[in-house]
Amino acid sequence: MATAEVLAKYELTIGIECHVQLATNTKLFSGADNDARGKNPNTVVNPIDFGLPGMLPVLNHEAVKLAVRAGKALNAKIANISRFDRKHYFYPDLPKGYQTSQMYNPIILGGLVEAPLEDGSIVKVRLDHAHMEEDAGKLTHYTDYSLVDLNRAGTPLIEIVSQPDMHSPAEAKAYVTELHRLMTYAGVTNGDLYHGNMRFDVNVSVAPKGAAELGKRAEVKNLNSFRSVERAAEYEFNRQVDLVERGEKVVQETRGWSDATGKTTSQRSKEDAQDYRYMPDADIPPIVLTDAEIEEIQNDLPALPSYYRDKWAKLGLDRSVTESLLNNQNYAILVSEIQDAAGDDTAKRVAHWFSSAVSPEDEAAEIASVFSPEAFIELSQMVEKNELSSTAAKEVFNELLVSDKSARAIAESRNLLQVSDESAIAAIVDEVLADPSSAQSVADIKAGKDKAIGFLVGQIMKKSQGKANPALAQKLLREKIGEL
Amino acid sequence: MTKIADYLSNSAVENVKRAIAKAQENEDYHALLALTETRALERAAKVDAGLITGRLKGVPFVVKDNFLAFGAPTTAASKMLEKFDAPLQATAVEKLEAEGAICIGKANLDAFAHGGSTENSAFGPTKNAYDKSKVAGGSSGGSAVVTALDIVPFALGSDTGGSIREPASFNDVYGIKPTYGTVSRYGVVAMASSTDSIGCFTTNAADAELVMSVMAGRDPKDMTTLPDFFAPTEVKPGQKIGLVKDFMTDDVDPEVRARVNDYVAKLRAAGHSVEEVELPTAKYALAIYYIVVPAEVSSNLARYDGVRYGHRAEGVKTLAELYGRSRDEGFVTENKRRIMIGSYVLSSGFFDAYYLQAQKARTLLINEFDKLFENYDALIGPVAPTPAFAIGANTADPIKMYLADIMTVPASLAGLPAISVPAGETEGGLPVGVQLIGKRRDDARLLALAKSLESTEAKQ
């Protein structure tokens, strides 16, 4: 492993290709169900996906629409005319002997992703282009045979090709994280990483700092998490610097990543690279989109993460709170609606609840879509009115996520409402002050050691089973001690 | 003149039985690879019972065996698909059946439609209807011969570079290659996606009009089909016809030129004007064609890999061997030649020099046609440079074989409608056809022009 000083002599350069499965109902060129999850092998395949003789592709216009949305979410230009090409290679998971893709005239041109890093800085990643293509099937290998499953064959994809604009593993992670948010917010993909809805190929090269040319790159294929993108880039940085330091050469090749070992291994060198014999696909007329059509699709585009970042800037949230909130679009929408309906303070309080409720890359946390902002506004108001302690509020919040009761009903059923009845609290205050164990604290307070009041408030809270309004308890305590 | 009309009033079962009997009598021509007798008789019984009716009720026909059709395997005259039973039928076949037509058999062709003589069939050549020592033409040779032998009144073909027109010319029948996109290609084994056109063989223009009316039209399953436009029509005297000089050079058999000139005389006699026109890019058409088409062929034939269906080599040990041997055994020499040419012209470093350059030249050719059609209603010339040649005469020399396509490929590359019309015979008794080429969507006008000359013939 190269030391930090050695690594510091080198510039790391990263470019990323990302395959995004589009959330259409049917496949790119056939009417077969596009959702292969949990389906038996080869059950969502029709003669077109199967590559029977005489079958012809019929372009799914929904996929085109999603590609346009993707392009707009990526700050890219949409081509008025784009075309499909055939990429030829033989493999049993490729039924036609070619993959229908876009080589010469892709639908999405250029683009820019601005991804926030954990240190608060932003990495700007320019995009070369993004093109539409169909996914291949899946092979499962056994000892002396392999099985083909074509359920995924023909699933619409866009491949987003970045410029080599990233220079650290953290930047690579920030880019793919933001890309995932952009694609899910725009409704382009379900974004389910576990099921391969987004897959990343990371191109890594190193060169001495200040060198005019980039080094030879290795491409780490098929990463399916943000963390593995970061780790693979880190590993490659070290591996390639080690090679160069030893006087060896980095070879241009395709490498695989193992999450278990945390290493990349060589799969295919450039010499084995296939000649794909790209050719225009004469079965599919060009996709022609007028500016008006593009604009219409763009007008449907939901708010993107940057919209919320701008909108929440005045809430004074920690960057980490904002970003973890943004990991779930439903939460972001909800907090935004609450901000509109009940103001910044309420939004801030709710934002904190949600940010700690969300674990990054949490797939199941979609439940908030069924909630109205009102339930959370009510909860916030209860806190404001001292009807709930912050701890109790968190408890109510957690139940709100999984129940359809109102905040108040939950608080009542859990017996969490704070006692703000002066006479009731006064009785407890008297009880606590009468307790001999309080004598020392009382004396301290009288002697000016104000901190000692904490102990007494704690005793009151204990006796009230946490329901006493602590502010009120403190007020009454001071009054009573003053009278003593 | 129409022949189909004679069938419409007969019992469908009788029509089918007669067609099958005639097919069996003429087995030595090897025009058919299979009869679909059982299914045909079942359908005929339904027609006679009044369960199926339509504009072609009870009319027997034959499909070229590259159309997915029920009743017998769809072989494309190849070992690769020798046992392939289609799970669905081509749109063209479905449309004909919906009008009551009955498919009685599957016609021989050059394997995967690669060829101009039907000698490339994996199951042996088809013989010319007029001289069994001569080729049937191709690739739709079987379809032309069953029509010429009067086994059926019409047969289906596909034309990628002349595969309907040339065998029509060689067998004295009508053959129409419509405007690209007139008839759905869905369910027809693809050869070259940018020129494949579905058409038919008949013994007269009116029958071609009827069959085309049924088959033509936009198909949601084929994105390249045009909106419905085909409608039979009439033409008045005074059409301006261009005789393509570049097709009438000394390289063309004098007897072929003589028959074309005879037809020109008939056109003039019928009140049309005919002038010589030039199509200089036509001389590059064959070179363009034999780059673009093999490129598309190499791509369209990539799916035949022995993995999911079709021929699969036995006893292979590796994936590469499975591909290599299955394809080696399943394809004929001409298939492999075109796959290799196509793979070559598409390979990295050659794509620009061959494929792109050919596509640019193709655009020049299209522009040249378009310019001519600003002044002319139709173009005329021979279909092929010679009448049917002897079986085996050209098989050793692929270039010589390709030269037979020299006058049919231009219309294919430009997507134009072109028909082959019987125009007499040589002294040796071999049929000669003339080719009429129209502007895009002028298919019905071409047929109407040919029809109008049939009636002058009848008057004479």
Image (tube, rainbow, N blue to C red):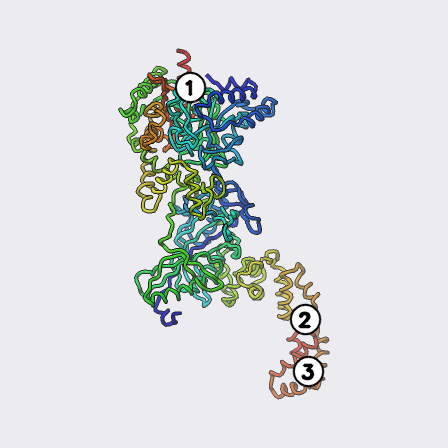
Q: Residue at x 49, y 60 (%)?
A: A225
Whether marks 2 and 1 lie on the same chain? no
Q: Residue at x 53, y 30 (%)?
A: B71
Q: Residue at x 48, y 18 (%)?
A: B3
* Chain identifier of the residue bearing label 3 in the image: A
Left or right: where A267 falls relative to A348: left
Q: Hey, what amino acid is under mark 2?
A: Gln
* Closer to us: A249 or B287: A249
Q: What element carries label 1?
A: helix
Q: What element carries label 2?
A: loop
Residue A148 seen from this side = yes
Whether marks 3 and 1 lie on the same chain? no
**Residue under pointer 2:** A418
Q: In which quarter of the image is the C terminus of chain A?
A: bottom right
Q: Looking at this rendering, what residue extends furthest in the left direction?
A: B250
Mark nearer the N terminus (2 vs 3): 2
Q: In which quarter of the image is the N terminus of chain A?
A: bottom left
Q: Residues within 10 Å of mark 1 (few under 14, many from 20)?
A: many
Q: Looking at this rendering, what residue extends furthest in the front direction?
A: B315
**Residue under pointer 1:** B451
- Nearer the viewer's eye, disc 2 or disc 3? 2
Q: Is mark 3 on a helix, strand or loop?
A: helix
